[in-house]
Amino acid sequence: MTEKVRFTKMHGCGNDYIYVNMIENDIADPQATSIAWSDRHKGIGSDGLVLIDKSPVPEADFSMRIFNADGSEAMMCGNASRCIGKYLYERGLTDKTVIRLLTLSGIKTLQLHIIKNKVDTVTVDMGEPQLEDETLFIASRNPGYGTFVSMGNPHYVIFTDEVDQVGETGHLLEYHLAFPQRCNIEFAHVEADGSIRTRVWERGSGITEACGTGACATAVAAVLTGRAERTSRIVMDGGTLSIEWRKEDNHVYMTGPAEFVFDGEIDLAKLQTA
């Protein structure tokens, strides 16, 4: 007897993941499943797999686990957290417009902005950035100095006129000796209108259309290096996110859209062994 699992494909600014409601489904090996399902030729195609479940602690309403396309588990994903907020509300799992989501980097608060009973955008309290040893120099093709910012997962932000070097340089820097746990890499440029054009190399997934934690890290790095004020528009390949680094609580707040793509059902065993 084959085991069927229902899934939902969603994206936040083009950063696409496969979402599974673990309250109703079971996936014994999420690492292997993420590798198989993320394959854009033989699987569903995505940047990874996101598992939504009840929270094991009373301080949170729900929990998430996220696995990259290479099967590695990530601590947090801003775009995925917004999608989870939309999923939970519009699929009737909650009627709350403020949701506490447990992640491997702590509990994140989601504020849903509702228009005509639909989630239009979501604001996520991403917490305080971690800035230990934030300025690094790595010798490579024109990155020069970059800024290290952790938003629950590690980011190295390089301001450059050559943001399209993301494919050439991103992979090299992800595995650089300076980052023993590997690192997400952002290439950013402040535009004439004050927006920050950013391209992303995600640890474990490669070039992605967007990265929520990466957008937050870029905004923080722009403030630290005197390139921007505490509110920024981060323009990525798949869309734009609004980021605010508030002085009063030192938290970073990310606001952006989330979209359903399609629902489906998969023979779990077949894809895990593909």
Image (cartoon, grey):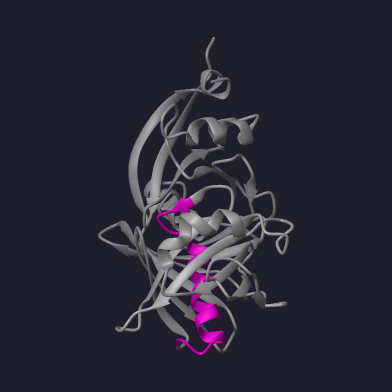
> Which residues are the magenta region?
207-228
Determine the residue positioned at 58% across, 53% down.
203
Residue 262 seen in the figure: yes
Taking depth in this image into account, of 85 and 96 the one nearest to the observer is 85
**Residue 182 within the segment the image draws in magenta:** no
Asked if the stretch drawn in magenta spans residue 211, the answer is yes
Residue 97 visible at all? no
Q: Nearer the viewer, residue 256 or 227?
A: 227
Q: Nearer the viewer, residue 159 or 216?
A: 159
Furthest residue in direction top, as rendered: 1
Q: Residue 139, relative to residue 47: is it above or below?
A: below
Q: Position of 130 compared to 195: left or right?
A: right
Residue found at x 57% / y 24%: 272
Within the image, what quadrant is residue 86 found in? bottom left
- The image position of residue 194, as x and y in percent, is 35, 83
- Considering depth in this image, is 163 or 155 the residue closer to the camera? 163
Vertical comparison of 86 with 51: above or below = below
Residue occupying image coordinates x 54% and y 41%? 69
Question: Residue 196 lies in what quarter of the image?
Answer: bottom left
Residue 22 position, x and y percent, is 56, 37
* 208 versus 138 height, above or below: above
Instruction: Give coordinates of residue 35: x percent, y percent.
Output: 56, 34
Q: Quadrant of the N terminus?
A: top right
Seen at 72% across and 64% down, the residue is 178
